[in-house]
Image (cartoon, rainbow, N blue to C red):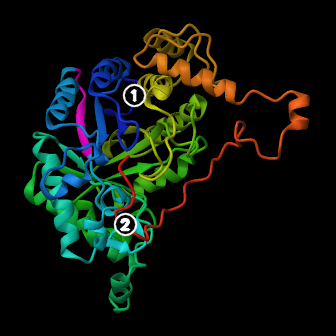
Amino acid sequence: MSDSSPFRMQLVHLDLKGAPPKVSYLAEIFPLFHALGANGILIEYEDMFPYEGPLQLLRARHAYSPSEIKEILHQAKLHELEIIPLVQTFGHMEFVLKHEQFSHLREVELFPNALNPHKEESLALVGTMIKQVMELHRGIRWFHIGCDEVYYLGEGEMSKQWLQQEQNNMVKLCLTQMKAVASHVLIHHPNVKPIVWDDMLRGISEEYLTESGIAQLVEPMIWDYVEDMDVHVKVLLMDKYRKCGFPKLWVASAFKGATGVNQSLTIIGHHLKNNIQWLKVADSGPAEMLQGIVLTGWQRYDHFSVLCELLPMGIPSLAVCLQTLKHGGYTDNVKKIVEKYLGMSNLEINNFMSESSGTFPGSDVFSLVTQVCDRLVQPLSPQEENDSPSYDPAHPTRCHQPPNQMECHHPGVAGST
């Protein structure tokens, strides 16, 4: 990393739960990641991992094979990109709990997103998932166990009964599952440190977090993807975690997939501002705690949601954000460096249309999608406007609302991605 960057590690997040790249494309794009300043990959497999045995039904039809996983790891090592696997173990478990075989492990019967933390079989399930992923990722230093957005936690029948006991509460319910999974990782892999998304921890009091012992088990990853992120609030949150005994933490920005559930074109300016805010946080917060930053690139808001921007659509944004983090800001010189790496003559930050689509891996997809979207949003002529019905499927209104939770009245009916 450049001396201008406060981040020792800069990781690119690969979200594989929609339009997962072929291994051949990853082999093309990893050298660019490295050149732009990344030194690691947070890889969220979801149903693309080649689970075996009783877990084989979790595989998507086009899941990577074990040999392809090994090739991905080989390519990452060639380009000095440290791999951190991510496996959801509490919330966002739709790809597991949608199957009839595992539907009895849902927190709420109708919703396949959250795992029931009361059943021993739940921990056995995630333990097996972690074991199989670990077997193909020997020598790793961190393992991300997810644990974000555990919707409907406490609303299952077993949880309601458990919460009726005087000594129990929602915070204890959440932390008990986190600690169980993290302890499982540490017992079986003492040299691997678990990471968790921090949103389920933020509202817990300093006293409770300290007494719970969670700080000795995990490293929290603070995430926020908005362009006007409150720097002061994030610095205070980092200091809170420090006081609670967490020795290290991570932060997470976004380079795509955070501005609309069905977004097709990446708003570079939004993500640039978000990453600049994180630079300000890093400059003001406790530097000794900071492990690094992950630039997330979400592909779906959840397993049942539509696709947002394809990975090639986010590469120019990723390039801008990585170089901005590396050099401590975005300048004309950084812009020229990015344009050189992308093969673009004039990169537009606040406009979807640039003078050239570039020569980077995936630039042909970038060009085609941009052209299609440009044609789809062309304004109607006055005559067409007068003749058009109130709803025209050829000119839909862009939706920026998050997807609703999918109810599964009949377990196992939803297909793989």
Quarter location, residue 245: bottom left
Disc 2 residue type (three-letter): Ala
Q: Is residue 303 left or right of residue 45?
A: right
Secondary element at tag 1: loop
Q: Quadrant of the N terminus?
A: top left
Quarter location, residue 5: top left
Q: Which mark is residue 166?
A: none
Decide: few, some or many residues near mark 1? Use Cα within 10 Å; few <14, some 14-19, many ≥20. Answer: some
Secondary element at tag 2: strand
Q: Residue at x 58, y 44 (%)?
A: 260
The answer to whether residue 328 shows anywhere in this view is no
Q: Position of residue 98 (x, y in %)?
A: 35, 62
Q: Position of residue 42 (x, y in %)?
A: 30, 39
The residue lying toward the viewer, choosing from 402 and 287, is: 402
Q: Which residue is mark 2?
A: 114
Q: In the rendered picture of this protein, how many numbered marks are placed on residues?
A: 2
The answer to whether residue 416 shows anywhere in this view is yes
Q: Residue at x 35, y 92 (%)?
A: 166
Is 35 above or below relative to 398?
above
Q: Residue at x 35, y 37 (%)?
A: 14
Q: Which residue is mark 1?
A: 5
Q: Is residue 224 left or right of residue 287?
A: right
Q: Position of residue 241 (x, y in %)?
A: 37, 58
Badge 1 or badge 2: first in the primary sequence: 1
Disc 1 residue type (three-letter): Ser
Quarter location, residue 367: top right
Decide: few, some or many residues near mark 2? Use Cα within 10 Å; few <14, some 14-19, many ≥20. Answer: many
The answer to whether residue 283 is magenta is no
The residue lying toward the viewer, choosing from 387 and 332, is: 387
Q: Residue at x 24, y 66 (%)?
A: 179
Residues rendered magenta in the picture: 79-85
How far apart, in angstroms, are the residues tagged by discs 1 and 2?
A: 37 Å
